[in-house]
Image (tube, helix red, strand yellow):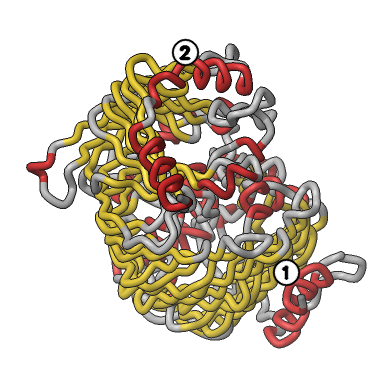
Amino acid sequence: MVGAILLALVLLLVFFPWDVLRGPINRYVTEKTGRKFEITRHLDVGLGFRNITVKLDGIEFANPEWARQPYLVKAERAEVTLRIWPLLAQRVVIPRLALYSPAVGLQMEEDGRKTWALGKDTSDSSTTPTIGLVQVDSGSIDFLAKHLGVDLQADLDFDTSRGALPLNYRIKGRYQRQPLSAEGRTGNVLQLNAVGQPPFPLEIDAVAGATRLKASGTVAELATLDGVDAKFDLKGQSLGDLYGLLGVALPETSPYAISGTVGMQAKKWDVKDLKGKLGLSDIDGQLQFDQAQKVPTLSGRLHSKVMDMDDLGPLIGLPPTKRSANAIEGVAPPPSIDQVKKRQRDANAKVLPTATLDLERLRAMNADVTYVADRIRNVHELPLDKGSVHVVLKDSVLTLDPLDLGIASGRVGGSVRIDASAKPSDIRAAVQIRNMQLNRMIPKVETLKTSLGKLDGQINLSGKGNSVASWLGDASGDVSLLTGRGKFSNLLLEFMGLDGGEIIKFIMEGDHNVTLRCAAVAFDVNKGVAVGRTLVFDTEDTVFNAAGKVDLGRESMDLVIKQQPKDMSILAFRTPLVIGGTFASPKGGVEAGPLAARGVAALALGALNPLLALAATIETGPGEDVDCKDVLAQAKQPSSGTPAAAGASKAKKQ
């Protein structure tokens, strides 16, 4: 008897005319959600022990009134698999959802409202269904999230003849407030939150702003991008653009093209076999980006066999050079530094980089990345040989420590610290210069035919600012550059000394080298004003002493150079040289007073006898050798009261 009753119950459920419940279900869902729900043609239900499969022939489910699209979903047919037991707890779990010719309208607002929340309160996340597998044939999807800068429309096209990737998609719109277009293929079943299912294949070719991504591989879950395993090609105008697109705070760079493999498990991205070009430089290495931590962390090692100096400008806020801007095929070149300068054409324009430090990026993540360049080329006036830097970003504090550069057969090393938690940022730099060969520093000056001495020095500066220009305009500290004995062209020296007789002699008899005894250039810097502490250039022929200041904030110069020859000469119109103007438009000249006095004397004597006019140009040579040891020692010591090395030393300790 019991068996017969159970059999009858099963037969009733199997052959139950579910369609008679269409009306009640339509009214019930409409009442519970506060928006119109309608099964337009036919309803059928398949029962199981764990799941219910609901087949809907024609479905229209309206969106809330505040949404842009009228329907959350409107489809010719739909199949919805529902877990039975979560329904008892008023949770909707959909292991599988199949939509045929759907039009889907998804929208979310900054206050938390979502069109796919199924309760009357669309900001209540508990009413959002959990969806596993989604199967879609030809249709369209509209997604809007204004507060995130996302406005996308996707068209879908299903064709079984395409094999393992039968679903074509085309996307257009805006992503992170940048124009986006994408197309690609995927498997016929998308896994939003599927557990225990094999990954599904995916191909994408996307362009967002100036960034282009091509990738192919597999993805386990679309909702979190978990289980990514793909090969990619990425190119664009600057790696810095990826912050808005992917949330990874990378520095500004020249145009780039890189490729590699990427995997993601449990919010940990792993980029391997990375290789490509940053402007004119090659790049390889590996990176990890861990989003599972409270503050996302980027780590890894990067390496260049050859790094081109033209690619360093964007790192400090300068536009790339023309060569670097046009280095990557298929990437529209950004404005080059030459183009920017042509637009400015202003004698008062800033020369120091004014690009603002992006504090939001420094606060958005932590980092621990090492970069090494085996060789550095195209160094123009700065002969860099090799370099490496260890970059650490932690709790909004960025340190470059150690910073190690091989320059002109010598070394520049030290550290830089930027505390972005301060407003404006607190920036400290401590740099030491050792054994740089001066003849390699200025190889294009043909008259410097023999080697000069070796250059040593130090730069200790600290200040506040949000750009290189604003920091230097506020910086305090000291700068010193020192060199010992060497040789260089006497002809260049005589031009600097305005010695007409010596110039004529060398033009007639040929150039000769003269011995440099020592040279020292040292400034005390206080709130952006660099005052000359020791400015001496001593040769066996002439002593040059300078005085004055350089205003880093205003980018102006006011220096006077006095020459004291050590030999007798005629046709000497020596008078102090004056260097002024701005960094953008420097001006050089002579002090008119002393030169005018010699000119008047020459005219007066010439009126008596033309040969006597030469007497006014005779230089008796009052200059004397300086005490080089004392000069170099003074140059190394900042003046008392200068707030110099304290700030920079902290950069080294912390």
Image point (49%, 26%), residue name: 144
Query: In the picture shown, does residue 93 fall above or below 304?
Result: above
- Residue bearing mark 1: 460
* Viewer can see residue 338: no
The vertical placement of 115 against 549, above or below, is above
Q: What residue is shown with label 2?
A: 70
Kind of residue sitting beneath label 1 = Asn
> Percent from the top left, x then y, of residue 335?
38, 36
Say what secondary structure mark 1 lies in. Answer: strand
Q: Which mark is in front, 2 or 1?
A: 2
Q: Is residue 400 left or right of residue 179?
A: right
Q: Locate residue 518: give its quadrant.
A: bottom right
Q: Residue furthest right?
A: 641
**Quarter location, residue 477:** bottom right
Say how many tags the image has: 2
Compare residues 165 and 135 and report the one nearer the observer: 135
Image location (x, y in percent) of residue 91: 61, 42
